Image (cartoon, rainbow, N blue to C red):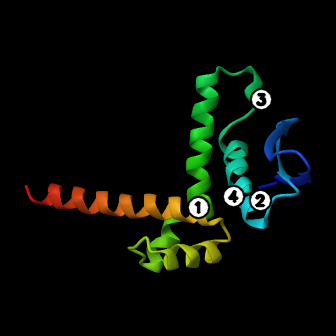
Amino acid sequence: LSITVFYWKDPSQALFFNNKGYIVLGETLSPQKQWQDFTHELAHVLLHTGSQSRLPQTFIEYQEMKANHFMYHAAMPTFMLDQLGICDLQDFTIHKLQTLFNVEYDFAKKRLTNYIERQRDMLNWNTYFYSY
C-alpha cells in the first residue's frame, strides 16, 4: 500500500504529506495495542485525507466512528470468525481469540459480542424474510 510506518513517544496517528499517508504508532504501547492502533490509523489513511484540525467536530466524530468500525473488522476479520464457527462469549473463547488475533482482551470481547449479535440479527432477519 506504500504506507510508511514510524514509531514515536506520542499517541498513534495518521499523517498526510505530499498526498502520501503515514502511520505513526506509539512506541511504548503493547504489541496488541500497536496492532489495534495500526488498523484504526490505516482506516484514516485509506478512507480520509488531510488534517482533521480544519474539520467540524461532528465530521471528526464521524471519521473516528468509521475508523473504529474498520479497526475491529481489519484486526479480526468476519470471514476468519466465520471459519472458526464461534457462537459463544465464554471467557475461554475470548482469551483464545485474543491470542489468535493478537489483540487486547476487551477488544476481542467487543468484536466477538458485535459478531455474535450480527449473526443473530441475520438469522432473525432470514427467518422473518423467509416466513412470508
Q: Are marks 4 and 3 in contact (CB under 8 Å)?
A: no
For residue 35, above or below residue 58: below
- Decide which of 93, 69 is in the foreground and name it: 93
Q: CA distance from mark 2 to mark 4?
A: 5 Å
Quarter that holds the C terminus: bottom left
Q: CA distance from mark 2 to mark 3?
A: 22 Å
Q: For mark 2, does the 10 Å Cα neighbourhood hold few (<14), some (14 to 19), or many (20 or more) residues? A: many
Determine the secondary structure under disc 3. loop
Which mark's residue is nearer the viewer, 2 or 3?
2
Residue 92 percent location from the top left of the image: 51, 79
Task: Give the residue type that dot 4 points to.
Answer: Gln
The residue that label 2 is drawn on is 34
The residue that label 1 is drawn on is 106
Task: Give the residue type that dot 1 points to.
Answer: Asp
Q: CA distance from mark 1 to mark 4?
A: 12 Å
Residue 39 percent location from the top left of the image: 68, 55
Determine the secondary structure under disc 2. helix
| Residue occupying the far front of the picture | 91
Q: For mark 4, does the 10 Å Cα neighbourhood hold few (<14), some (14 to 19), or many (20 or more) residues? A: many
Quarter that holds the N terminus: bottom right
For residue 30, above or below residue 51: below
- Decide which of 82, 34 is in the foreground and name it: 34
Q: For mark 1, does the 10 Å Cα neighbourhood hold few (<14), some (14 to 19), or many (20 or more) residues? A: few
Task: Give the residue type that dot 2 points to.
Answer: Gln
The residue that label 3 is drawn on is 51
Determine the secondary structure under disc 1. helix
For residue 32, above or below residue 59: below
- At x 80% / y 47%, what residue is drawn? 12
Q: Who comes first in sequence, dot 4 or dot 3?
A: 4
Q: Who comes first in sequence, dot 1 or dot 4?
A: 4
Q: Are marks 1 and 4 in contact (CB under 8 Å)?
A: no
Q: For mark 3, does the 10 Å Cα neighbourhood hold few (<14), some (14 to 19), or many (20 or more) residues? A: few
